[in-house]
Image: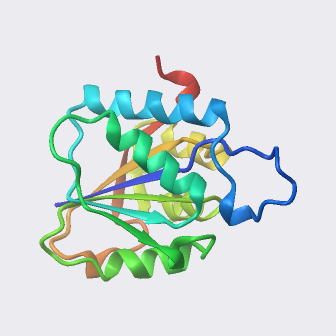
Amino acid sequence: MKLLHLLRHAKSAWDDAGLADHDRPLAPRGARAATLMGRHLARQDFRTDLVLCSTARRAVDTATIVLAQLEGPAPPLEREAGLYLCGDRALLDRLRSLPEAVGSVLLVAHNPDLQNLTLALAGSAAPGLLERVAEKFPTGGLASLSFGIESWADLAPGAGRLEEFAIPKNLT
């Protein structure tokens, strides 16, 4: 069994028009949303073997804040430029290259890549979850999928079950 958690970076700031998109930080609202998501995961005793994160500042800031809310040792965090606005196919290819020893991974990246990847991989879900993802995958949103596979190389469209779709505005 493999677990995949797809986290869209939280709301970023647009205050500095001269800042490159890649370098935009989180807005105060985004920092609050990331904290809420981290606390939500902590209540679930969330554990993951690896965090893959886009090198965009807003993604790294989101991952850092979320992980700071969790108990226990932090999982390895790999920042990868290739995850920045790369498309859902590139994300899938990256996930397929994960070592078999990794049972659970948290991928922190961007939309529309995460929304498209979630919809492609989820063959089943609790009633209404897929429709919510299709409608909108907001900043700070998290989709968690499970797969009955032994190797990440076997990750295929429709092979997963969408277990949860959490969004910051519904968290307290």
Q: Quadrant of the N terminus?
A: bottom left
Nearer the observer, 73 or 38: 73
Q: Is residue 92 left or right of residue 2?
A: right
Q: x, y percentage for residue 59?
A: 53, 55
Left or right, residue 49 beside residue 6: left
In the rendered image of this protein, does residue 130 appear above or below residue 53? above
Q: How many labels, in total?
A: 0
Q: Residue at x 61, y 36 (%)?
A: 30
> How was the colour assigned to the protein in this rendering?
rainbow
Residue 155 picture location, percent across and down: 32, 74
Vertical placement of 11 versus 5: above or below?
A: above
List x then y, in percent, for residue 66.
40, 40
- Residue 114 lies left or right of residue 68; in this view the side is right
Query: At x 63% / y 70%, what residue is drawn?
Result: 85
Report if residue 167 is visible in the image.
no
What residue is drawn where x is 49% and y is 39%? Answer: 129
Query: Which of 24 and 102 lies nearest the eye of the viewer?
Result: 24
Q: Is residue 10 visible?
A: yes
Quadrant of residue 77 within the rendered picture: bottom left
Instruction: Using the rendered view, name the quadrant where residue 102 is placed.
Output: bottom left
Res 101 → quadrant? bottom left
Residue at left offset 60%, top offset 74%? 87
The outermost residue toward the top is 172
Q: Is residue 134 above or below residue 65?
A: below
Q: Position of residue 156 (x, y in %)?
A: 37, 75
